[in-house]
Image: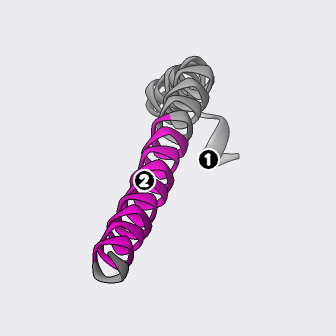
């Protein structure tokens, strides 16, 4: 019976409001967080592709220089 007094009811009302506001805020943030995560994934993929291209070109340059030095030695 003590839980149904007006004082206890009024004390729990702000807690319900805070919980409701928190739930609304979290629901609003969820799509934004998903968007940010997808942008970070795209950024990371771009960095990885750039790194792979850099390594590929570095290897091609090293191979070309080795071939040039082999040709110069043969000449």
Which residue does the numbered mark 1 point to in the structure image? Answer: 2
Q: Which residues are magenta?
A: 43-72
The reply to whether the C-beta atoms of the residues labelled 1 and 2 are less than 8 Å apart is no
Is residue 56 shown in magenta?
yes
Earlier in the chain: of badge 1 and badge 2, it is 1
Mark 2 burial class by Cα count in 10 Å: few <14, some 14-19, many 20+: few
Q: Residue at x 39, y 52 (%)?
A: 54
Q: Residue at x 48, y 49 (%)?
A: 53
Which residue does the numbered mark 2 point to in the structure image? Answer: 57
SS at badge 1: helix
Q: Residue at x 36, y 60 (%)?
A: 58
| For residue 66, above or below residue 55 | below
Q: Is residue 38 left or right of residue 50?
A: right
| For residue 38, above or below residue 66 | above
Q: Is residue 18 or residue 35 the one in the foreground?
A: 35
Is residue 46 shown in magenta?
yes
Looking at the rendered image, the disc whose residue lies closer to the viewer, 1 or 2, is 2
Q: Quadrant of residue 59?
A: bottom left
Where is residue 65? Give x, y as percent: 32, 66
SS at badge 2: helix
Mark 1 burial class by Cα count in 10 Å: few <14, some 14-19, many 20+: few
């Amino acid at each position: 019976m003590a839980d149904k007094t007006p004082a206890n009811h009024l004390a729990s009302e702000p807690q319900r409001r805070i919980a409701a506001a928190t739930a609304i805020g979290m629901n609003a943030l969820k799509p934004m967080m998903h968007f940010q995560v997808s942008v970070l994934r795209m950024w990371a993929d771009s960095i990885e592709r750039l790194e792979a291209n850099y390594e590929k070109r570095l290897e091609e340059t090293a191979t070309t220089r080795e071939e040039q030095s082999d040709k110069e030695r043969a000449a």
